Amino acid sequence: MIEIKNLHATVDGKEILKGVDLTIRPGEVHAIMGPNGAGKSTMSYVLAGRDGYEVTEGSVTYYGKDLLALEPEERAAEGVFLAFQYPVEIPGVANTTFLKTAANAIRKHRGEKELDAMQFLKLLREKTKALNMTDDMLKRAVNVGFSGGEKKRNETLQMAVLEPKFAILDETDSGLDIDALKIVAEGVNALRSPERSMLVITHYQRLLDYIVPDYVHVLSAGRIVKSGGKELALELEKNGYRDFGASEAA
Amino acid sequence: MAAQPETVEQVRAVTEQKYKYGFTTDIESDVAPKGLNEDIVRFISAKKNEPEWLLDWRLKAFRVWQTMEEPQWAAVSFPPIDYQDAHYYAAPKKKDGPKSLDEVDPELLATYAKLGIPLREQEILAGVEGSEGKSPAIAVDAVFDSVSVATTFKAKLEEMGIIFCAISEAVQKHPDLVKKYLGSVVPYTDNFYATLNCAVFTDGSFVYIPKGVRCPMELSTYFRINQANTGQFERTLIIADAGSYVSYLEGCTAPQRDENQLHAAVVELVAMDDATIKYSTVQNWYPGNAEGVGGIYNFVTKRGACRGRNSKISWTQVETGSAITWKYPSCILQGDNSVGEFYSVAITNNFQQADTGTKMIHIGKNTRSTIVSKGISAGKAQQTYRGLVKILPKAEGARNHTQCDSLLIGDQCGAHTVPYIESRNRSARVEHEATTAKISEDQLFYCRQRGIAEEDAVSLIVNGFCKEVLKELPMEFAVEAQKLVGISLEGSVG
Ligand SMILES: Nc1ncnc2c1ncn2[C@@H]1O[C@H](COP(=O)(O)OP(=O)(O)OP(=O)(O)O)[C@@H](O)[C@H]1O
Ligand SMILES: [Mg+2]
């Protein structure tokens, strides 16, 4: 279980998160919607442990552990995965090499045996096939020259390979064409399980037709201002965020 | 074997008398006294039982050297070197050398362990007293193995007519070849350090590949690691006769210590018609500690002559060691259609300084050169790429492409690019691209979010940055070099 309590965080001295409360139980999918600049990505970075995102108040308990006390790589090894809104390019490092390094680092942390090149390739092929990705993308350098949609698909592939316990998807749907959106959503749905929870950040209720959430929250000006079932997304689509102090956030 | 104090005294006495009684009677000694003068040059030559012409050549070099001054143009700084305060022949072991591995810097040992170096070689690399001569108490197999491997290889090479031996041995056994080519690429008047090397070089490698022969294995100085230290003035000469091919590896990934601070090696390569020489170096001399104390000065002159048509010389270097590196492996593209390549990775961390690059001299028609330089700076290190591309009037259709990339880690280091281009032929095409980047916080966080620890992330990103160069290395070497890249940058972030 993940319990976020009264989370306050600042970036460059500016307070962005102003008291977030959220509880996510194993197996649940929570969607977060909210206006631009509300602090959605900030929240995902704080949970993943990015430098420069300073928690000034509150706590995050992750399966009994103090998540905020862990280094980013330790959080990853504990099963926290963030699909980035803007995936990062790493020139010269083949996607396969990157993924193998990541997968083995996590396995090592968990006291599991590292995979050799053959074993890893086999695993990777299976996952790639499920996401309709080409081998070509695996040989290329991480995200270099990838189209916006390819980058998002690559994030989904990484998630599938690393099999996290808590996945945060930050606008993984933006930039995807309709077919890709379905593929990614299917990939995500395939990963749904009673042990795995997800936090899906999106601007479009369309994604939630495919990935049906248990809860929908509205984050505005650094706070969760409304929570509900999946019908809340439909309501937002119709009325926008004006009832939730969107102007305050802008 | 350590020199007896009285021998040193004897030699000094004799030298001071300017060999009044002829030095031949005194050359039993294992060590030359400190200082540099004509007698020392004669002493070295006599110790090696060299022919008259070689002694003359050394002496000519020495006389020129005395009129020369240390080059000041490189972007490196160091306190003046006292050339009289050094032994130029078989210098005695330093008195406070470690007695066993227990006394060696544990950090150095940790690095050896990471690289998987056998214990016995660790002793030699770390300069444990007497480790070269003593009967091996540990890892006996490692020593006997490498000796027997080397011998087996040698037999096979001889069968094909390939000569691969110490240059001092070549002077005795193949004097005509040595006389013909020694100094033919780097003349004894070339530059301060190379000229010094000509006067006092002690040993190094000699390779000759006969016409039409493709050398069936990588020739590696690594085989010589258990033999006597070739010392600070190493001299290498490689000749690839028409239609032949050779790949030569110099150095090893293990950090090497040496009691001599100044290293001034000379490497000469000669490629005849349709011949190819691939020369790969991994240089990892002791860089000094994290505060910048100690460390080797590596002032090297490396040059290859593509004498024949369609000949090719390819330099690949991975430079991670030394306190100061001054090094410009170059190609003289004389033969029509000849090709010169320079692939370089230079990593400087802490207080290291490197001024390195290449010279491509296009003389023949349709000569082509490629330069790929990847410089990585971390800590307070300073690094300069210095490259000359010179197109002479007759080099019709010559082409050069230079790609020069710098990567900075942290904000206290520096990278500088100094390209010199001189083109005297209108049909020539010269392209130069340069980039400077930093390892971004974004990239590090992305890797860490995927479970990769910060130092491993740096290693991964830097290896990606160097990929174009590392892929030029022979396979086994490339894997070691990748590890080395990571190790060299440890402690550079966080
Ligand atoms: N380094 C920074 N310095 C100052 N303000 C920052 C910094 N980084 C982010 N912010 C601000 O924090 C606020 C929240 O940004 P965040 O990226 O979390 O929004 P978001 O909800 O993800 O928006 P979007 O829907 O556009 O992705 C914005 O106003 C942004 O300008
Ligand atoms: Mg965002």
Image (spheres, helix red, strand yellow):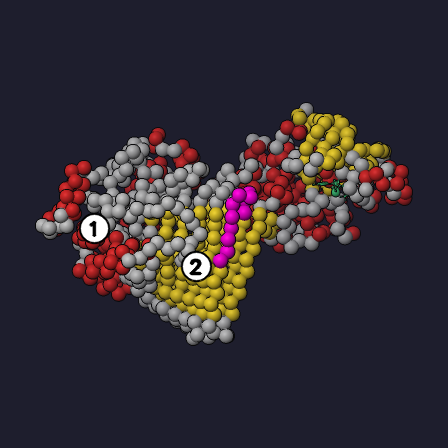
Instruction: Tell me the subunit letter for badge 1.
Output: B
The response on whether ligand 1 sits within 8 Å of label 2 is no
Query: Which numbered tag is attached to residue B40?
Result: 1
Residue B100's image quarter? top left
Measured as percent of width and height from the top left, residue B243 is found at 36, 67
- Tell me if residue B129 is in the magenta stretch: no
Mark 1 crowd level (few <14, some 14–19, many ≥20, 10 Å Cα)? many
Q: Could you tell me which quadrant the N terminus of chain B lies in? A: top left
Q: Which residue is mark 2?
A: B358
1 or 2: mark nearer the eye = 1
Q: Amino acid at mark 1?
A: Ile
Q: Residues within 10 Å of mark 2 (few under 14, many from 20)?
A: many
Q: CA distance from mark 1 to mark 2?
A: 33 Å
- Is B410 included in the stretch rendered in magenta? yes
Q: Residue at x 68, y 49 (%)?
A: A151
| Residue furthest out toward the left | B21
Q: Mark 2 is on which residue type? A: Thr
> In screen coordinates, is A157 left or right of B285?
right
